[in-house]
Image (cartoon, rainbow, N blue to C red):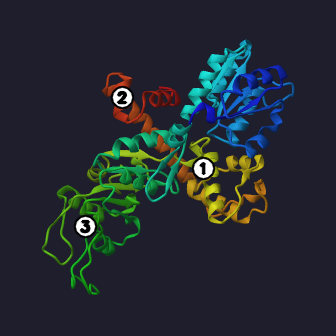
Amino acid sequence: MQLKDAKILIIDDDEDVLTALRLLLKSQVKQVTANKNPNNISNLLAKEKFDVVILDMNFNSVVNTGNEGIFWLKKIKELDPKMFVILITAYGDIDLAIRSLKEGASDFLVKPWKNEKLLETIRALVSRKKGIKNATRLTFRKGIKIVGESEVMQDVFTKISKVAPTDANILILGENGTGKDLIAQAIHENSSRKDRPFIKVDVGSLTTSLFESELFGYKKGAFTGAAEDRMGRFEAANGGTLFLDEIGNITLGQQVRLLSVLQNRQLTPLGSNEVIDLDIRLICATNLSLTDLGDEQKFRKDLIYRINTVDIIVPPLRDRGTDITLLSHHFIDMYAEKYFKEPFTLGEGFIKKLKGHPFPGNVRELQYVLERAVIMAEGRVLKANDLVFSPIERKTEQSQNRTVNLEALEKETILQVIEKNEGNISKSAKELGITRTALYRRLHKYDL
């Protein structure tokens, strides 16, 4: 995207500032919209798709929640989490302006600004527009998207990009409804095996007898009811990827059988003497933490090491910050198209109610709630009463403990890796599969 194609919104109660910015930008960009009243921001963003908002830090009106610039910045990011916002501030507001960067501002300029500096800033943001869109969505061939701009999801995207091209076995950890199956598909779709089969099995639901026959197959007459040969899921996935979901729920006996096949890379179907060589990429998923899996009375440690060359922790929705707004826009647009409805605008009450809900069912629950809202909505603006949360989902003490365990595990892992690398942050970040910046954030988060 080029600067000449950009649409800019300016919000400032000083008419002289509006006039100066209009004159500067009108020959540089496609459209300049200027407004003195920040209360009009919601309507302006609902009517037009802007690329950059230039926002003053102070207005004549009184906002009770604190600094006005940060208040309106938060409003803009609620309405459009992807929006680039440049704050214009007086010299005395520098500390507030720096604080605003933590709240999602893209940049700030000090009055009186330099025209070239302002144009450079806008040009840089506009040129990033397409790249940012790509960074917030991981898309693969079946038209499915993984959407997220939060730091925790960017870390997940980074890990996917690093592990997908390899044949490493992956263990995906996360609560129910976080999208572990989509992560598994994304890894497959971005691997060298993408044109080969992707076979998913919910192993946690298989009985002992079904486990053997479903995974490894059987020959006709192998047992009562075996009327014909049947290929197992392992053989069906040969050359491609096998995804074993709910791996944490299989019995110790099933674990022994699975470990044997993974170690030997061979299997023998029931009722057969034929040995079949295996060439698969294994991905497993569970809603248990590694701490829970480490209980040897329930799960074999040698199997954990076999399936967990690299682990990916998918964060719960409540830990994903502005992703809830981003996901809401994505799902609402998707369902509006599916049900042949006009595009919707999200009212402030709608967004506030969404953000106030804990979503124990995670993204799966959000998707269900928004599909229902789109179907039942009577107007084009979605309001708070359009949201009806399902009584099926309950945030249990168990799920809270899982989160604590995952955080404790992450903290312990970071300490071990840093100690191993004698305090070298760059080496430690590389080994952990995250950026140096992401590692510093975690050090700050855990007070390390």
Q: Quadrant of residue 124?
A: top right
- What is the secondary structure assignment of the residue under circle 3? helix
Q: Residues within 10 Å of mark 1 (few under 14, many from 20)?
A: many
Q: Nearer the viewer, residue 130 or 226?
A: 130
Circle 3 is placed at which residue position? 235
Q: Residue at x 46, y 39 (%)?
A: 155
Instruction: Determine the residue positioned at 20% across, 55% down.
Output: 263
Which sits in the foreground, 390 or 329? 329
List the residue tagged with mark 1: 327
x%, y% of residue 298?
35, 57
Residue that sits furthest to the right in the current view: 61
> Secondary structure beneath disc 1?
helix
N-terminal-most mark, 2 or 1: 1
Depth check, mark 3 against mark 2: the one in front is 3
Helix, strand or loop for disc 2: helix
The structure residue drawn at horizontal position 34% and vertical position 44%, both measured from the top left corner, is 163
CA–CA distance in space, label 2 to label 1:
32 Å
**Residue 186 place in picture, x, y as percent:** 41, 52
Amino acid type of the residue that numbered disc 2 sits on in the rendered structure: Ser
Q: At 29% from the left edge and 47% from the top edge, which residue is drawn?
A: 168
Residue at mark 2 = 428
Separation of marks 3 and 2 at Cα, in angstroms: 38 Å
Above or below for 18 versus 292: above
Q: How far from the left and from the top, in percent, is residue 8?
A: 69, 33
Q: Give the residue furthest to the left.
A: 273
- Of the residues shown, which amino acid type is indicated by label 3? Glu
Side of 259 relative to 198 (left or right)? left
Q: Which mark is residue 297?
A: none
Q: Is residue 61 above or below residue 208?
A: above
